[in-house]
Image (cartoon, rainbow, N blue to C red):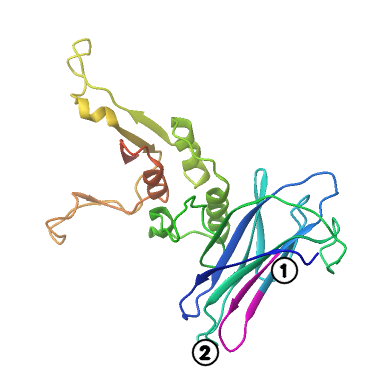
Amino acid sequence: AYLGMTQAFAIVANDGLPRCYSIAVGKTYGGASATVGFALNLGGGAASVVVTCRINTDTGQIQGATTGVFDAGDFWLFYGAIQDTPSNGSTTCSVNFYPALSANGVLTPDTAAATGACTITEAQFEIGLVPSSRIRTLAAAVTRAADVAYINVERSLVQRRADAFQRLTEQGGQSRQYFIDLAATLGEPGCTITEFRPMNCNDDCNDSLISAADKFSWRVNIPHGNAGARPMNCNDDCNDALDLGGESVIECPIRDRAPAHTNVFFAYAT
């Protein structure tokens, strides 16, 4: 039960901000797999701070303060948040991972005779109380625009939880339906997508003059007006847009996931 893997993986700033460690653990079936756990440690200061988490890989049941779990398909994504005070000065983070702490279905106490194995992947460590979407990389540290973008749209706790769940579990895609479903998941059902092709000699004389370059553009049609939209007036800056308004919460996520060779823009119903 006490044979595990230890990794010291980060030196963090002595800023008092919460940090979140998350890892995906393969689901098991049949009631024979041992309880899996990890201990997140923040040391090097006057006193160490430790957060422990245990999980039943059959059911996803967990135990541990400041911990949580998401259902991520074939895996359980479970996490723990840790925080220190600047006066304590702990800045060295490490994690101890244990594949078998006790028998199946027993979250506590630990049992020295327990044996077992598990599959783990996609460990991630970041600032915050809950994990963001997975960033698959071999680099030491990365930042993705979608995770730091800010839109001035008030979101309820339920909506923010839905956003986090969508980021953690989505598989990605490039189809028209993928982006329509993404918009619906983020609170904009009923969106449609318009793609463009260049005008040719078989088109009607009244058709739009769409250039060859426009075939790489596509439009997301949002079935309601732009909140707070208004035309530019004499009090605005000369460089402002001719129409001003707030953005839908779907604009940033869709732009971030759009194929790299394309240009996406958004149209609101009038």
Above or below residue 210? Residue 81 is: below
Residue 104 lies in the magenta-colored region = no
Q: Horizontal placement of 209 versus 166: left or right?
A: left
Residue denoted by label 2 = 87
Q: Give the residue type that dot 1 points to.
A: Gly
Look at 66% across and 57% down and name the residue there. 69
- Residue 102 image-quadrant placement: bottom right
Q: Position of residue 172 (x, y in %)?
A: 50, 40
- Residue 99 image-quadrant placement: bottom right
Look at 63% across and 79% down and name the residue there. 49
Residue denoted by label 1 = 64
Label 1: few (<14), some (14–19) or many (≥20) C-alpha neighbours in 10 Å: some
Magenta-highlighted residues? 38-50
Q: Horizontal placement of 95 versus 164: left or right?
A: right
Q: Position of residue 166 (x, y in %)?
A: 55, 48
Q: Quadrant of the N terminus?
A: bottom right
